Amino acid sequence: DSGVTQTPKHLITATGQRVTLRCSPRSGDLSVYWYQQSLDQGLQFLIHYYNGEERAKGNILERFSAQQFPDLHSELNLSSLELGDSALYFCASSPGTAGNTIYFGEGSWLTVV
Amino acid sequence: AQSVTQLDSQVPVFEEAPVELRCNYSSSVSVYLFWYVQYPNQGLQLLLKYLSGSTLVKGINGFEAEFNKSQTSFHLRKPSVHISDTAEYFCAVTPPRNTPLVFGKGTRLSVIA
């Protein structure tokens, strides 16, 4: 158990819908990262928050947004869902930023039908 | 920008045989290097990391990796594998600044009894 909690574990939704994935980082960790894992793209970095502020943005679509709240939990919002958005979405956390080990949650499986 | 190439997508190996999973990276600056393992239906777990110092890094479960700056490689090795080592292995890189990990596409290690 990494200490990173993600909900829901599985989610099935229809195209065009909107979903929210939630992440609670390890106790004391200030950084939260979101990654998308799919068969064709591998592990793609989406976005990084540190203590409530966006620090880096990767291959995140405009239909996707995220935020980190004062209690340090984070949410990833996916809207206007398409079939190609079906993937495993990981949240990870670390104490700081550079050089720290990143601890991953078990992921949220999203299936868009 | 940094990139990671894992040269083998799949590696089958017999139980108790040695294994090497290859990883090459590309970066114009110094980097930190990581190996993560993903067991079926689980998140990623850190195996080992290189930040500085000795180029031979020992990790969990009997794995080790050697950082070779001249060849820009960070190959993962284990002298004798077990069935339980069957998993997906990811190499990752980040420069020692405020940037997220960049992952390779992964190598699926299958240990055969």
Image: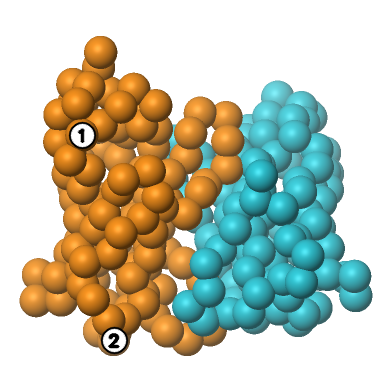
Chain colours: A cyan, B orange
Furthest-top residue in view?
A: B113
- Residue wearing tag 2: B29
Name the chain under label 2: B
Q: Is A58 situated above or below A82?
A: below
Task: Name the amino acid type tagged 1.
Answer: Ser
Q: Is residue A16 above or below residue A12?
A: below
Instruction: Name the disc covering residue A72, or none.
Output: none
Q: Residue at x 25, y 17 (%)?
A: B112
Asked if residue A36 can be seen in this view, the reply is yes
The residue at the point 26 percent across, 54 percent down is B64
Could one spot residue A46 in this view of the protein?
no
- The disc placed on residue B80 is 1
- Dot 2 falls on a residue whose secondary structure is loop
Coordinates of residue B9 in the picture (x, y in percent): 26, 37
Q: Residue at x 48, y 78 (%)?
A: A99
Counting from the top left corner in percent of width and height, residue A85 is at 63, 41
Work out whether residue B39 or residue B10 is closer to the camera in this orientation and state it: B39
Residue drawn at the location 75% of the way across and 34% of the way down: A9
Total numbered circles: 2
